[in-house]
Image (tube, grey):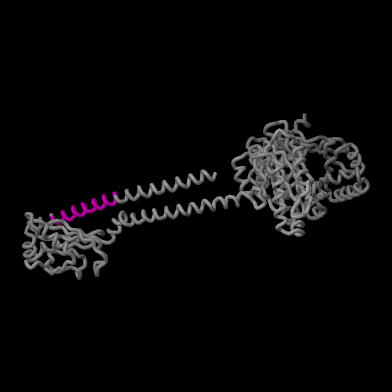
Amino acid sequence: MRKHFEKGTILFIVILFGIAGYLQLSIVKSTQKLRGEELVKTEQYAQKIATLIRQKTDNTILETLEKNRGVREDLNKILEAFLTKQFIYMFVLYQDANGHFRFLLDGSLKKEEKAAFKEIFIPKSNKFVEAYTTGKMQIIEQKKVGDTEDIWMTILYPILVDGKTEALLSLELSSTYANYLNTFNSPLMRIVHWMQLFLLVSMIMLIFLAYRYYHLNHSLTIDKTTAYTKYYINNFFSKKKITEYNAFLVDIDEFKDINKKYGYAFGDKLIKMFVQRMKNKLIYGSKIVASGGAEFLIFLPKTTHDFKTLTEAFYKEIKTIPYELDGHTLYLQVSMSALRISSESKLYSDVQRVLDEHLMLVKNKGKNHLKIIDDSENDKLKYGNLDYIKEAISERRICCLYQPIVDITQDKTVKYEALVRMIDRDDTSKIVSPYYFLYAIKDTSQYIKMSKMVLEDVFGTLEKYPTVQISMNLDLNDLYNAHLMEMIDKYLKKCQKISKRITFEIVEDRDIFDYEKVNAIFGQLRKYGSKVAIDDFGSGYANYAYLTKLDVDILKIDGSLIGTLLTFPERSKMILHSIKELAERLKLEVIAEFVENEEICEILKEIGITYAQGYHFGRPAPIDHYIK
């Protein structure tokens, strides 16, 4: 890379010098050409004026102007008319017998500036005499002199009659016109000279910058621990596929205690030894990235070696072998998580997130341990990828499965709960739980699209089966989403008969603070005959406060309470009895969730709970599986 950089720099300088030389030559030629063209135009301009003067005076300029004041005034006005932004003064002179120049015509616009006829004119250049005597046009380039500071150049054009100078036409060009011409002359040349100087300075600067570049690049890509930086790995995986690697996340436990006991200088040396030992143990092509503190993210190329064996050997090497430094012998406590990256992974940051989660679990359980993440965790990377979910929604691989809710006193299905699922792209027989994808699209437009598909499925099922009742889940964010609630309201209003057979189960993942607002939304849902249920009652956020502040129809008892019926039967029965009795007084239906077997079902009958749901009665399946 360095070699290419140096060659590129040299080539760049050479090209710039070539451009500068070419510009200099081009400017000289174009300026000469432009000046020549402008002088030709000016001479043609003067020639036209001289011709007009000769015509008006019948080639007897002095005699006619002396005798005919009217012609003189007309010609003065004509000269005034010829004045432009370029030619700011225009007058005609003649030389008397004594050799003095006198005014014949003056085209000045201001009366106070206009010279009188035959008023003497004192030239400040011998070019006047030269032009008069030789009969050839002369050019006077003037600098800032007295009242003529706005004049840049004077063109002296002899008016000839029979080859003899009868008068001298003076055209005075403005400094504005000079700026126009000089834009292509000396300023441009100065620019080229400055450019050449700039290139010389640039060459020196580029040499310096090349030196600084390598130091900066080193600091950006290599951490003080000698591991790579996040900047480096971001660039690396913009060109490489994450699926070609597996990953470790390694952290030295309580490294701050080592710094505190032995000092930061000792800690820096130790961590460099630690990184070097990891490098020695890892296969060729591995990348160690400093993730912060004493934590390192490692990507190692996939090989034919057994991942578990390789991981355990690496962990043993960095943890169990002592570190000898400055007369001290240390054994490090190291926490580590490892992941075999699936072919569906897209971003290294997603891989790091999964590794972080499991490393945190290791630390919470006492640290100093290795966690090889189960391959099922790759499902989080695959199905939690937003692009994958978008594709599933666009291809309508979102569906609803239905689980029966049973009246256990009559052994009769009374309702079905609609449960959203995603169909795997590569294996259509594989159904993906919302656990993997729902959180990823919360508060996005994709969530609204998915919700619309669920509503279409639910209302389509209700329309197809006139006797079926269905429950569907909404969470608090859904209730606060105006767009989604507007969509639900349209469905309920359009299908009012169907609306009486639908129940909205409110799933809570946080506290309700505005009960008045939530009750108003419940009223909107119940307006057309629908019911509202509180899901997961008795655990987490869904508590007894809901019964006093919210107007609902059904309580669904959380599965964690149902599950304790076999492990803590007496207390669990008492709690369920109290919920059931309270619900009866409030005229609420009660449904027990997660009923896994007949034993739990019999206990629920004993308690007096009428409705139940769980694998004992049926797993989530297409509605046609239950309704023949």
Viewer can see residue 559: yes
Q: Please indicate whether residue 374 sits to the left or right of residue 79 in the image.
A: right
- Between 516 and 564, the one lying in front of the other is 564
The quadrant of the picture occupied by the N terminus is: top right
Q: Position of residue 158 (x, y in %)?
A: 13, 58
Can you name the residue that lies furthest to the right here? Answer: 570
Residue 226 position, x and y percent, is 66, 49
Query: Considering only vertical position in the picture, is 369 above or below 42?
Result: above
107 in the magenta segment = no
Q: Quadrant of residue 406?
A: top right
Residue 30 shown in magenta: yes
Q: Which residues are magenta?
A: 29-50
Q: Percent from the top left, x then y, of residue 309?
A: 77, 37
Residue positioned 48% across, 45% down in the render: 8
Task: Give the side of residue 395 with respect to residue 358, left or right.
Answer: left
Q: How many marks?
A: 0
**In the image: residue 196, left or right of residue 113:** right
Residue closer to the observer: 387 or 164: 164
Task: Work out which residue is located at the far top of the displayed protein and give it.
Answer: 628
* Prevailing secondary structure of the magenta residues: helix
- Image quarter (top left, top right, bottom left or bottom right) of the C terminus: top right
Q: Tell me: residue 185, above or below residue 70.
A: above
